[in-house]
Image: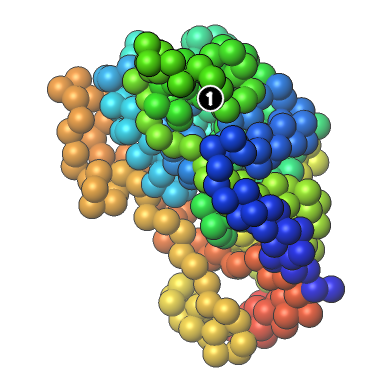
Amino acid sequence: MILERIGKKEKEYVRQVLASQFRSSAGSEMTGRLEAAFAARFGVDYAVSFINGTATLHAALAAAGVQPGDEVIVPPLTMASTAFAVLHADAIPVFADVDPGTWTLSPESIKREITAKTRAIIPVSLYGLAPDMPAIMEIAARHNLFVLEDAAQCFLGFCHGRVVGSIGHAASFSFQSSKHLASGEGGMIITANRELALRIRRFNSLGYKAVGGAAAHGKICKEMIQEPGYERHASVGWNYRMPELCAAVALAQLERIDDFVEMRRSVAGLFAEAIKDCSWLTPQRVTADYQHAYWSYALRLGEDVPFSWQEFRDKYSELGGDGIYGAWQLTYLEPALRGLRLHPDQSQQFSQGLCPVAEALQPRLLQFKTNYFDLDLAGRKADALQATISFFGA
């Protein structure tokens, strides 16, 4: 089976945008169509498109009322953008540890990190697997905290029968080139809350008050802005809007979402078959109440093996694999944050020992690509993995 990454529909929608010659009268047609279709697919009332999946997080935190000096709980094991967005909002990221089996944000660790300054939680669906959202939402309700799902790696994942992104107060998705749906760059925020959607819309559109008439639409009426006395800006905002060309591609990709997600799950199935008899490679724990979206197929390398992570990676490449990605360095150990003091009353020291489960896990993670669009090719990579396991001994 071969699946075109960019097909006829993407090209046709881009052609339509180009044919408009970027006239302002047609300025948000594709973004409007994309937002309406995305909201409908994920079962929410509002979707707001963005230039990328970091701007989404920043805007949602600001719209939720997160203030300078507030604390936002985040996982340390994910792309640094999650914590960086907290910094963009002039707030303080607080790192809670991860669950040793699912590798996602631990509810018990969240409880330990809540203080009087905590305002929000950003649970990440790591590699395409949602964390324990029912427990996280219960904690949030008890402490009146805003929950922003970071679903950048999780399109059509499910948690206890609900699609990921529809569980928190808002959710962020990414259309960056490695994601299930890719338009080069782009992002989306979804929510069921009209007032929150309105604040998010204004934040991503320079605070234009003309977007206030409808939280679900960003188009600004020409007749209104032609008046010399027209007051444009109801609030201070950023220019985070998605370009029409990116929206055109994202819309076409959304219309093919089932094929893209199913292909990744099929690739993950090939890798799962390859490791089934291996005692020293462990995948994420996925219980019956969850459905994984497999942005990546990740494995934990056992601690007692007589070879290194690098030796395993090199042998896999030698035997026909595409190489293996290591997990991101824990965000608080990146040079940008390590040892940083953001506030005199900062409760955490960004240094080794902060999240011991994540610190033990991170150096042993092996991330395998699932964005193959040819199952025969993916099968050969799974064969290479099986051969690598055989070489080292199952």
Point out residue 207 in the picture as x, y percentages from the top left corner.
41, 21
**In the image shown, does 292 or 175 lie closer to the viewer?**
175
- The total number of labels drawn is 1
Q: Secondary structure at mark 1?
A: helix
Point out residue 78 in the picture as x, y percentages from the top left corner.
46, 48
Decide if residue 127 is in sight here: no
The residue identified by callout 1 is 222
Q: Quadrant of residue 13?
A: bottom right
Q: Quadrant of the N terminus?
A: bottom right
Amino acid found under the numbered disc labelled 1:
Lys
Q: Residue furthest bottom?
A: 318
Q: Quadrant of the C terminus?
A: bottom right
Q: Looking at the image, is 195 positioned above or below residue 59? A: above
Q: Which residue is at 63% across, 29% downward? A: 47
Decide if residue 221 is in sight here: yes
Q: Which residue is at 74% across, 36% downward? A: 37
Q: Looking at the image, is 149 positioned above or below residue 368? A: above
Q: Which residue is at 56% across, 42% downward? A: 23
Q: Looking at the image, is 365 positioned above or below residue 139? A: below
**In the image shown, does 240 or 93 lie closer to the viewer?**
240
**In the image shown, does 332 or 43 lie closer to the viewer?**
43
Asked whether, in this view, residue 17 is left or right of residue 144, the answer is: right
Q: Which residue is at 62% across, 38% downward? A: 26
Q: Residue furthest right?
A: 1
